[in-house]
Image (spheres, rainbow, N blue to C red):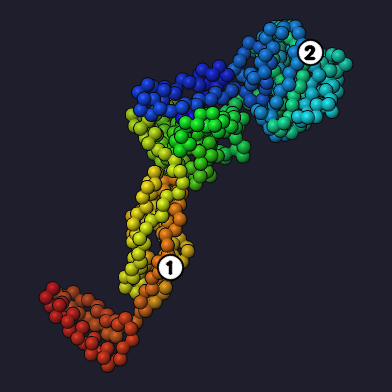
Amino acid sequence: MLFLHGAGERGTDNQRQLRDIAAWTEASVQAKHPCFIVAPQCPNWREGFQVYGSNSELVNTTYKTYAGSEKQWKHYVISPGRQSTGKMSWLFFVNDDWGKDTPVESYFRGVKVYEAGQAARAKAVDFRKAPLTAYGGGGRGNNPTVEDDGATLHMVGDSRKKIPLPYTLTKNTVLEFDFKSGARGNLHAIGFDDNDLIEECKWVQVDWGAAEHSMPKEPSFPMRMVTELLPTLQKEFPAIDAKRLYIAGLSMGGFGVWDLLARRPDWFAAGVPICGGADLETVNTVAPIPIWDFHGSQDGTVRVDRSRNMIAAIWNVGGEPRYTEYPGVGHDSWTKALAEPELIEWLFAQKRPAGPPPPPTNLKATCVGVSKVELTWTPSTGDESGIKEYRVLRDGGEIGFALEPRFTDQEIAAGEVHSYTVIAMNRAWLKSTPTPQVWAKTPADTLPVRIESVESQGNPYRVEIHFEKAVDPKQANEKADELLQAVQRFAKTR
């Protein structure tokens, strides 16, 4: 069970994101549905790497190891590509103390950026030649000094600065430097950015308040970490059932549920997005997945139309999602959603099929008149997710679908010969192999040899007499007379 928390639970304390997972951790639930629960925590600020400071909730704290080395140089080798890749424009430095006028201090010396294996050729930044400008508002604007013939940047007082450093980060990029501080502040950090904004981390880097969004080409940094985490856990814990991976999330995490279902529809047996939003263009990808979506009708943070529109789109393409909207409820619809008495049972009843369903059997084709072929077959059995529908093919091309094991082809002409096959499709939209072909030949049509009007209880009826094959005209007329007389006698009794 993968749970993606909301915006208010971001940070690095590995605690706040656990607030809303009680629905799955209760002893009664675990006793009936034992499961692993994975609740990663999204950080607040994506670009930076913290090395020192009292705050542990804003940036990556993997390298926050300077405590205990005060007033001494400490060497750092960072892999920034583990957090973000792509073209960057700036290298920034943070010596932050929440805007206070305090003697917070940072030294950054011998800063190098290079690809792994190329350290010997890398040159350190010369701060005498690199113009320093404000970054992310600049703090209180204290101006740093350049020391050691350009090798060291010395920052005193609340300040955020950047230098131009066009560079394309890869997973092999290395950031190397020495750090020293004589006065701890709120945040001492270094990092790369492609703009002058301090951007908050999100499961999906989109505007939550917008009427719609397009799924970013690449997953966000925290979402990329999640996609790397799940396969690792499956290797570490072989008991995890690959056919029973579930995902749920609220608010920011609701966006994350839709995003990850679209990126990895082959992973999850079901999804539970709560007060989130999806890219409508991904509807065909997510429609086969069992989904139960929740939203409050009075949500002022994420528009309720984000859920309404996506659910309608899924129904329109043949999906069968569940949707619960709470009248009068605002953004905190997760309170009611996670307490839904049917949610747990519904969720754990879903199971991703191991593969396509078996094909139907005993396909038969029967001609009905000169322009219809009636098909019947024995339903597919043994598919865990259940059969959604059957697709009917004539001469190799799809002509329709059926929910029951029967179908009538009415789009043919007399005297034609056609082959038919049927394919079963389960609720994961996986298709079976086709049935063996059966053939049908409709009889040739003939012109009526007699058209008469017969009256029954005052109502006129048109009678057409045909023969399935050509016959002698005299014999045809004689036979037609006999048939017509029989019809007239029958009509008098009605």
> Residue 294: percent from the left, percent from the top?
41, 33
Local crowd at mark 2 within 10 Å, few (<14), some, or many (≥20)?
Answer: some
Q: What residue sits right under mark 1 in the picture?
A: 419
The outermost residue toward the left is 493
> Residue 383: percent from the left, percent from the top?
39, 46
Residue for point 47% across, 32% down: 240
Type of the residue with mark 2:
His
Residue for point 38% across, 70% down: 440
490 to the left or right of 203: left
Q: Quadrant of residue 341?
A: top left
328 to the left or right of 201: left
> Residue 280: percent from the left, percent from the top?
51, 42
Residue 154 — which label? 2
The outermost residue toward the bottom is 474
Type of the residue with mark 1:
Ser
Local crowd at mark 1 within 10 Å, few (<14), some, or many (≥20)?
Answer: some
